[in-house]
Every structure is written in C-alpha cells, then in structure tokens.
Image: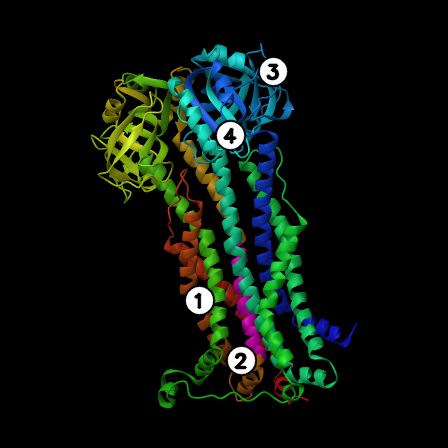
Amino acid sequence: MSMLDRKLYRDVIRLWAQVLAVALVMACGVMTIIIAIGSYRSLEETRSVFYDRYRFANLFVEANRAPLHLRDRIAAIEGVGGLELRIVEYVLLDMQGMAEPATGVAVSLPDEGQPSVNRLYIRSGRLPEPGRPQEAAVLESFAKAHRLTEGSRFSAVMNGRKQVLTVTGIVLSPEYIYTIGPGDMVPDPRRFGVFYMSRDALEGIFDMGDSFNNAVLMTLRGSQPESVKTALDGLLDPYGGRGAYLRKDQISHTFLDNELDELRSMAAIIPPIFLFVAAFLVNMILTRLITLEREQIGLLKALGFSETEVALHYIKLTVVIALIGVAIGFVAGNWTGREMTQLYARFFSFPFLIFRESFDLYAISAGICVAAAFVGAIRAIWSVVALPAAVAMLPPAPLRFRALFGRARGSVFVSQLTIMAFRQIIRAPVRSLLTSVGIAFSVALLVVSMFSADSVHYMVEEIFFRMERQDASLYFDRERPMAALDSVRQFPGVLRAEPFRALTVTLHAGHRSKDLTIFGVEEKTDLGRIMDADMRPMPPPPNGLLLIGRVADTLGVRVGDTVEVELVEKDHRRIVVPVTGISQSLVGIDAYMHIDALNRLVGDGRRISGARVSLDMLQKEALYAEIKKTPAIAFAMLIGLSRDRFRATIEQNIAMIQVVYTTLAVIVAFGLVYNSARIQLSERARELASLRVLGFTPAEVSNVLMTELAVVVFAAQPLGLLLGIGFSRLVIDGISSDLFRIPFVINSSTLAISSLVVLGASLMSALIVRRRIDRLDLVAVLKSRE
C-alpha cells in the first residue's frame, strides 16, 4: 500500500461518521433509482411478455346481438390480424359462506382449443369442454379469494336461472390483469370474479345461438387501429354496436398504465433530490478536509508528489464514499424492490412477477451516484491541483471581521455569543443556504409522502358520504319500465329507492369526441348527488346536459354551447343537446340529465336501468338473499363494502410508502445537519476552546454552534413546505386520469408533522455533535501546530 493510500485509509477511519452519513444519503438516491426503474421494468416487461405470448387484443367492441356470419367481413377489414367473437355477460354469483351477492363475468371460449385472441394462461387443471355446460375455468384471483380448486362448485344466476358450476381449471388472462368490479375503486376478488365456459353452454343459457355480443381484435403492426375501429363500428352499428375502443381505454390496461406512469414520475423526481444533497455533502467534507490539510498538501508537493497524484488521492476518497453509498443502496434497493413487487402482485394478476435485477440497472444507479459525488468534489479537488506548494505551507490569511450590529445596541439586545453565531452564517452564506435548501428537500419529501393520506381521506368523504350516499346500486339485466322501481321498494330492508337510467353515448363537439355514460336521475335525487365546481349538491336541469369539468375541457365546450349526442346503444342517431351546466366528479367521466329529459331524448318511453337504495342494515342478509333469487338484477354494487375495501387497501399502501419516505427524509436531515455541525466544529474548535478557557460554560459555548444550526434548520421549514406542496401538485397532475381524479388536499397537521419530524432529526444530530463540544480536549485543541 502506497503512502497516500495509507493516508486515505486513515482518513476514512477518522471521518467514519461523516463518511457514513454522506453514504447513507447517496444510498437513498441509489435505492430510489433501483426501486423506481426496477419495479417499472418488472411491470412493463412482464406485461409486454404476457400480452405478446397470450395475444392480448388492442381493439374491443360490444354489441347487443350480432350474427356470427359477420366473422369473415370483420376479418377482411384491412389491418385485422386476429379476431375472437365471444359471448360476455354479467351475472350474479352465490358463493358459499358469503352472504352478500358477488358479481361475475361469464366469458365464452371456442369449442376447440384456446381463443385466437386473449389466450388464457392455465395455472392448473384444464379448460371447459364442449357438451359439458356445467364446467367453468375460474380466474386465479377469484379462486384464491374463495379457495376454489379443481372440482370445487359455485352457483351463478344466469339469465334468470341458477346454475351450479364445477371448476375445471384456474387461469389468468391478459384482459384481467387488474380485476376490478363495477363501482369498485380497488380490486375486491371476493365480490368480483371472471369465469370461462364453452360457447355452446353460454349460447344455450343466454339464447345466443349463432350470435355474439363481444368481439376482441388484434391489429397488424404498421396498421392504423383508428381506421379498423371505424370500419368495425360500421359493420356492428345495425346490431346495437356500442362503439369500439382501443387498448388504451381498456380498464385493466389503463390502471396498469397509471401505475407505470407513477413509477416513471418517482424515478424522475425523487432520486435527484438525494443526489443533489449527497453532492453538496461531498463538497462540504472535501473542502473542510483540504482546508485543514493545507500544510500536508504543501509538504507532499515539496517532497515530489505531483499535482495529479495528490488530486488522485482525494478522488479516491470521493470514490470510496460513493462506493459505500452504492453498496448500501444496492442492498436496500434490492430488498425494498422485492417488497414493492410483492405489493404489486396483490393487485395485478400476472403468471409471474419478479423484481428485475439486470446488471445495467445497478450500473446506471452506481454511475449516477459516483457522478453526483464527483460533481460535488470537483471544486474542492481543483483547489488541491491549483495550490502551489509554497503557498500551501503558509498558514491561511486570517479572516477579516467587522461589527455585525452597532456596538452599543448589540450588547443590549443580542449577546456576543449570538453575534458569533450569526457572523459565521454571514461569512459562509452559500454553504448556509445550500444546507438550508438540503434540509428543505427532506421536509418536502415528507409532505409528498404524507399528503396522499389527506387526499384519499377527503376523496372517501366526498365520494361515499356526499356523492354516492346509497348503500347499494342495483343494475337490471336490461332496461325496465318505471314500474320495476316499485318492485325494488318491496325488497326487504329497502328504506328508500331512487331510479336512474344509464346510457352509453358518444359526445361530439366539432372534431372532438368522447365516449361516456349519461346518467338520467330525478330532480330531487339525494342518494346519488351531482356536485358543482365547489362540491355542493346541484339538481339536474329539466332540459340539457350536465358535463363534468374534465369532459368539458376535453371537448372544448362551456355552458351555453351545444354537443351532438350519438346514441351508440340504440340506432346511432345524433341529437343536438345544449350544455346547461358543469359538474364535478372525482371518479369516472359521466354526464347527467334529468331522467325524463333523457327518456325523451331516446324516445322509447319511461325506462330505468336500475335503482340506488338505502338499507336497513339489520335486514341486509334478507335483502342479499332476495337479490340472489331475482333474475332481473344483473349485478349489485355494495357501496359500503367498496368503501371499506378501498379505505383498507389505500391505507395499507400509504402506510408502507410513508415508512419508506419518512426514513429517507430523516436520513437526509440527519446527514446534512450532522455533517454541517462537524465541519463547523472542526473549523471553530480553537475558537470554542478559547471561550471555555475564558470562563464560558460548556452550555454557553455549545449554544454558539447550536444557534447557527437552529437558524439554518428553521429557515428551511417554509421553503420545504412550499417545495412539498409543489411536488405534491406534480404528483397529483401526473396520476390523474379519466378513471379517477385524486383531489389536491394537504391538511395543516400534515405540514406540521413533516416539519416536526425534520426538526427532531436535526435536533438529534445536533445533540450528538454537542457531546463532542462538551468533551473537547482544550490543551490538544489550543496547542500550536507543529
């Protein structure tokens, strides 16, 4: 080992606490890069492979009832590379040991082999065989929730008849990676499941002989999906076609895309914060070390060591610090990434989902970390190269001081020790500012990690207690006369019932269009409220259309403008309707009309699609039993269970995220304050020791340093809170979509807790340094340097 390498070894041992503090901050940056990019790759690559191998469709369409002889005409559309015509129906499920009704989706399989599009991954067992109408293959998430295995049985109410089905296999599908039921906001596999049956079985049950009501297509590479979509709509319009939509609008794909967008945002925002702080800390340590080792550097150059060799010595120190951080980040990132992958596995139904540990991921994170360290060290290292030996061996020029306050007034209002603390801040304004900015980032991290709980709590209150106030929503198998509402009111436990009509339409405004559902409701609706821009209840207008703000912005219309309503479920007529109001919604992109106005628009009489009901919870089991034996009810949305599931799931995820980011924020604050205090102590040790000799108590001497740190830390709080609010807004804007809009809400308690956590971490690191001040060896510090 060369002499300079031995010095490097001693420096690392001597500065171990500061080196570790910097390395931990670097490790946080490495860890977040590994988590964000690794998790993103795991989801993206697994999805891509699953989609390709199992031929996931990129065009979907539904119809009322279309003949199978259209197959050849659809397949002949230019750009179509694969086609599957299916029967897909919502059904009620009666699961053993579960009082409430579950919702199921029955999907037909071809009589021979796998579907040509949306093929199934068979986890165990086999697919149903033709001629065996009681067989079904069940999606894995639903099977796990109910402990279904091959040979298990469950009941389904299909087209008014109760069928007992036998499970032949457990499967997964690229179409249902994110399996979410109607009205739910997070997956609930107990109450929503997908199962597959042979075509001949579903044809007989739903009277769909030689017909289909659902088609999925794959388009060829290089083709134009929009042109295929237009041609497909033209073929299916006479058969009640509801408008084809692309993969980007398919609900499972959309939720998965949103998660990938969130990971991309995290990779772009979070790691640079840690790497900026780490670069600053490296600069602080090396600048302080070079300042203290001026004479040693001069001697090394005088003894024949070249400028390159001396500079290389400090570069090695930088690399050692960075590599320690990289090593810690690798271990922590790998472990946390695996935990995150397990969390994703609970939501997304993949055949496998493994945290990706590719070499380039670790190389990229290590390279970025080392580069950040060099950016922080380059100025200090350059001062080593530029320092002539003769100048280095001279003591540094003494600093020039002047009165900070007027002499008389300063002695009255501010103690001399306090003036010493403020003078040091003014002497090194850039370092003080950067330290304060670094601490502000740790406050911002906490705000970003904690504000989501406030937003979600507000979201739950608005959706489930102010907007969707019903206990359940009952959807009929088809549109029924208004008299069906009287039957619902006779159900056991129903205290109140309000009708609604749901109609799938396409709104056109010039060259812009939007597919959505218009809900027709009564004027005095109270269970399903419509909210205005200030989230206050508003009635539907007697005529005209209420648009959600996001839809109005997409179409470029305002109150008083008109839109064309295309009745895609009917005969595709286009009717001009005025926009009479703008409403707000946190979930979905629905529009609203008075139910009488909507019925007049369609022109088929007074029809309803279902009813929202409030319940006597003491009779809920009797109601559930009644729903299960009522053929006219296609499915039931149980709002209370959806709310509880949503709240529990989100709180669990938020708790994990908050633990991770709180730990990271504490590490940043601790590392910054500790290193800043240690450097100040090294620079001012003789000054502080002199005060002790002059008779000041250890507490008074410590307060010089503590006051300086307190000013820097407290100055960081407002900036950190502002940065946190700004970063939180970026997060909200990044994850909002047509499916949902998370409100931007930050409670004052969240801001206070974020600030207090950082203040606590800063106080802890400052107290550790204070112990060193109290234990100063006055003789060793004050003796003249040899």
State yes or no: residue 673 in magenta: yes
Q: Which mark is residue 698?
A: 2
Residue tagged 3 = 112
What percent of the width, then of the height, locates residue 274? 54, 60
Q: CA distance from mark 3 to mark 1?
A: 68 Å
Q: Observer-nearest residue: 428 or 93?
A: 428
Visible residue check, residue 36: yes
Mark 2, Cα crowd under 10 Å, few <14 / some 14-19 / many 20+, is some
State yes or no: residue 368 in magenta: no
Judged from the image, the secondary structure of the residue bearing numbered disc 3 is loop
State the predominant SS element of the stretch in magenta: helix
Question: Where is the C terminus found, in terms of image quarters?
Answer: bottom right
Q: Nearer the viewer, mark 2 or mark 4?
A: 4
Amino acid at circle 4: Pro
Q: State if disc 4 and disc 1 touch (CB < 8 Å).
A: no
Q: Earlier in the sequence, mark 1 or mark 2?
A: 2
- Does residue 389 appear left or right of residue 653 in this picture? right
Q: Observer-nearest residue: 723 or 409?
A: 723
Q: Residue at x 44, y 48 (%)?
A: 734
Judged from the image, the secondary structure of the residue bearing numbered disc 4 is loop
Amino acid at circle 3: Glu
What percent of the width, then of the height, locates residue 415? 42, 83
Q: State if disc 4 and disc 2 touch (CB < 8 Å).
A: no
Q: Which mark is residue 716?
A: 1
Q: Which mark is residue 521?
A: none
Q: In the rendered image of this protein, does residue 382 appear above or below residue 631?
A: below
Which region of the structure is painted magenta?
A: 661-682
Amino acid at circle 2: Pro
